[in-house]
Amino acid sequence: MKLLRRIALYAGLTVAAITFIYPFLWMASSTFKPPVEVGSLALIPHDFTLDNYRTMWARAPFGRALVNSTFVATTITLAVLVFGSMTAYAMARLNFRGRPALNAATIAVLMVPGQLTLIPLYTLIVQLGWVDTYAALIVPYLFNATAILMLRQFFLQIPQSLIDSARMDGMSEPRILFTIFWPLSKPVLSIVAIFTFMGAWNEVLWPLLVVREQNLMTLPQLLTVFALGGGAGSVGVSLASAMVLVVPVVAAYAFLQRNFIESMAGSGIKG
Amino acid sequence: MRAEQKTASLMAGPYAAFLLVFAVYPIAFALVLVFLQWDLVTAPTFAGADNIRLLVHDGRFWSAVANTFVFLSIHVPLQIITALALALALNRQLVGRSFWRAAFFLPVVISGAVVAILWSNLYATDVGLINHLLVKIGLSPVPWLTDPRTAMPAIAVMVTWKNVGFYVIIYLAGLQYIPRSCQEAIEIEGASAWQRFRYLTLPSLLPQTILVVTLSTINGFQLFIEPYVMTGGGPLRRTYSVVLYLYNNAFAYQKMGYAATIGVALALIIGIVVFAQRRLIGKAEAL
């Protein structure tokens, strides 16, 4: 009876795992199949072909989009780590006028749904003349309230004696932050880095509003425009373009899955 | 002290400025836009309460809200059941536990745009994998995304599939907080597996369930890329979401005032629904 139960448990888990993994495997294999084979459930292509990738690469600037996405997501992540830490350090460990107000404002900002500010932010970008620029994709994300609160929470737990002795040695506050706090904060920094990067990498609504020039599009946006505009022409081609977006993420996930799960579950972000 | 003040303002000042420009100003300006008519080309004009009046009588807006409730009525219960079931399965002595967990979490890390494109193909009527399977077991194919009755439920199932790994982690965390002594005590009392679940596990997980309900509801109101990619809001506007309507008003029709009004209304609706859910769950718990 007990054995039967265990068998049922593992059978159930296997079925569940297949429903989560199989669609992605099917997607990957379909990109190597000619159009007539795409409808089949088989994972090994009968007539292996790279045509889908050739067509996709020739019809839309996916290489450029990969560069754009990497540049935008990396810049945002670095900014959120560096500027966010500086802000969080001041909010956690320095006394200044306006600190309670800044704290309260940070929490208040998190309670406002993004849809409320979407249009005013868009009109702001238009008025700044930032439509079709990297600035539109990057500047509104340079600081992240969730990241600042997480970093602040972590910085609050670091002993004051470390700061005091560093100050006696004549260290400046930024130096204390980057040479003493940062090495102690690796877990929280990696959590912030992953959810910030993933959020920026997968974001699609904001680029759809502020970028129209194909050469400036990020991957999810170009992929969406390409699939919807009929540019792909076939299932294999549109899935091949999706692979450009998926492969780097799955590769990183395979190595750092623990960190990914902790990070994305902890921050409340769902691509 | 003065030096500290100066350093602090250098370190936190940029963030304060950022908040003013990219958070406080947009929130305030959203409320101003509600009373404006603006196509971004000509100068904005004062519109009084026109946008609000239009919204109240706008059948398209309210049908998008109704569509969201259809979505939520399937998505939220299904999300709770699947996440809870998988979390309970993972909460045992298992071989390869981290593998199972990673498998369930995989769709969470994938972009919503990719998931939407992938599932358009899985749901396709003639060549889709799901219909392929149905035909194999002797059923007739279903036009998932082109039949007005099945389109929104199909999207709700897909979104549940994408996010379930996230909620499994939340439930797993909650399960670790149920004291061992309680579990042993209820077993000694001779409770059946169902009784243990109903009177110990489920009530202990109430905080997690509230979180799942709240987050999946907010997420449901933000539905955009799925209908945008998979159905364009059709068939018969049955999958038209509020954010898709907001996006089209801003981007396709250049009506900034009205789009902002939809945004403000949506924020209010989310606030009211989440508040009402919490009250209801609170009452249900008291019974």
Image: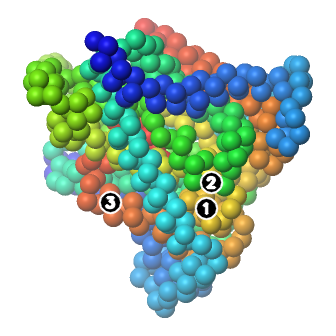
Mark 2: give few (<14), some (14-19) or many (20+) Cα within 10 Å: some
Q: Which residue is mark 2?
A: A133
Q: Amino acid at mark 3?
A: Ala
Instruction: Return the residue at label 3.
Output: A252
Residue nearest the observer in this picture, A111 or B200: A111
- The CA distance from mark 2 to mark 3 is 28 Å
Q: Earlier in the sequence, mark 2 or mark 3?
A: 2
Lateral position of residue B149 relative to residue B24, left or right = right
Alpha carbon of mark 1 to alpha carbon of mark 3: how far? 24 Å
Image coordinates for residue B49, horizontal then vertical, percent: 87, 19
Q: In the displayed structure, does residue A167 sit left or right of residue A40?
A: left
Query: What is the residue that sits farthest to the bottom in this orientation?
Result: A47
* The disc label shown at residue A216, or none: 1
Q: Tell me which residue sits at (35%, 40%) in the image.
A: A82
The quarter of the rendered structure image containing the N terminus of chain B is top left
Classify A259 as above or below B256: below
Residue A127 visible in this rendered orientation of the protein: yes
Query: Is residue A139 toward the left or the right of residue B95 in the image?
Result: right
User: Residue at 41% across / 18% down in the picture?
Assistant: A103
Which chain is mark 1 on? A
